[in-house]
Image (cartoon, rainbow, N blue to C red):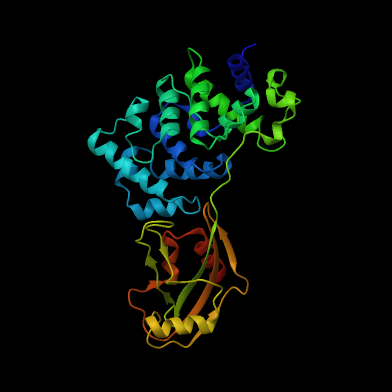
Amino acid sequence: MSFNSTLANWYLENKRDLPWRNSKNPYNIWLSEIILQQTQVKQGLPYFEKFISNFPTVYDLASAPEIEILKLWQGLGYYSRARNLHFSAKYITKYLNGVFPKTKKELMLLKGVGDYTASAIASICYEESVAVVDGNVYRVLSRYFGIDTPVNSSKGVKQFKMLATSLLPNSDLGDYNQAIMDFGAKQCKPISPSCIECPLSIDCKANATGSVKILPVKLKKTKITKKYYNFIVFNSQDNETYLEQRKSKGIWHQLYQFPLIETNKSASTKDLLEHHRKTLIFPETFKELNLFNSTEIVHKLSHLELKVKFWILETSTPIKNAVKWSEIKSYPVPVVIDRFINNFQN
């Protein structure tokens, strides 16, 4: 039995029951693919359901305020995906009359849509003969064919794309692409794959050579940068605080946060008061400054490791542009701040 037909038979019996597979609606597929970038299905599924419930059509998404979209996205990370989603929705409704592009080439013109996402939408919705290559596909192909070219190298990206394209069947392109992705997610898993029960094991090079655990090969990631974040949480007698929106590019762009003091090492009360004397970041009068979390919170991102402290600044001075504590949950904030808010208010 061929590679393709084996995958097809496996998919018929084992495919995951996912809500976006109930139709060929490109809006649903696009939304699911953007959410699942850098996100596992079990984590992304509730977000897909929330977005479909709140924005059932691309017109609903396009007309929504950005702050509402960022709030719904809260906790997924990589917030540029949400902003790109909103930008593309407005582009589709304004310039394409709400009609999604129907080819991979046209889909890649949408902001936030790359080769993989465009290929997935084009093949699933329109049966275009294009291969999808994500982490699951890299793993299946590298193991089955015994390829040790690093999957995150320029050579590897090109090699695996050409191989995946050469394996495409003549029909049912969308099902085939979903089959190989599901196979990687459920059968040919990163750790402890089910090789004994695998229908491809007889011809799998990695299984034959005992190299399942070392394939696929990846180049070492870039060095992780460590930063020390000190959030100053204003707390007034009127049950108000203060939030500022991050305007600079980079992590958490457009999200809200408490005033931030970044230091090059773990900060003490003395360090922050010295910083205040130079910058006057605190209100004119304040009663005290106390550390909320005795142990630094370690918040890891793809390229950053943040060591976070929250400092409660009690003040009797009215806060300019204050936010009521009772309304703070309406603001989109990074997940580490959301967790603090939950702990602080309980």
35 or 224: which is nearer to us?
224
- Along the horizontal axis of the image, is 1 left or right of 116? right
- Along the horizontal axis of the image, is 155 left or right of 2? left
Above or below for 10 versus 265:
above
Quadrant of image for the N terminus: top right
Above or below for 299 versus 111:
below
134 or 330: which is nearer to us?
134
Q: How many labels, in total?
A: 0
- Along the horizontal axis of the image, is 212 left or right of 303? right
Say whether residue 108 is visible. yes
Quadrant of image for the C terminus: bottom right
Which residue is rendered at x = 50% and y = 40% of the image?
36
> Residue 197 placed where, x, y %?
74, 24
> Residue 114 placed where, x, y %?
40, 35
> Residue 178 placed where, x, y %?
53, 26
> Residue 238 placed where, x, y %?
41, 80
Say whether residue 183 is visible. no
280 or 182: which is nearer to us?
280
Q: Quadrant of residue 146?
A: top right
246 or 124: which is nearer to us?
246
Q: Quadrant of residue 145?
A: top right
Above or below for 96 versus 203:
below
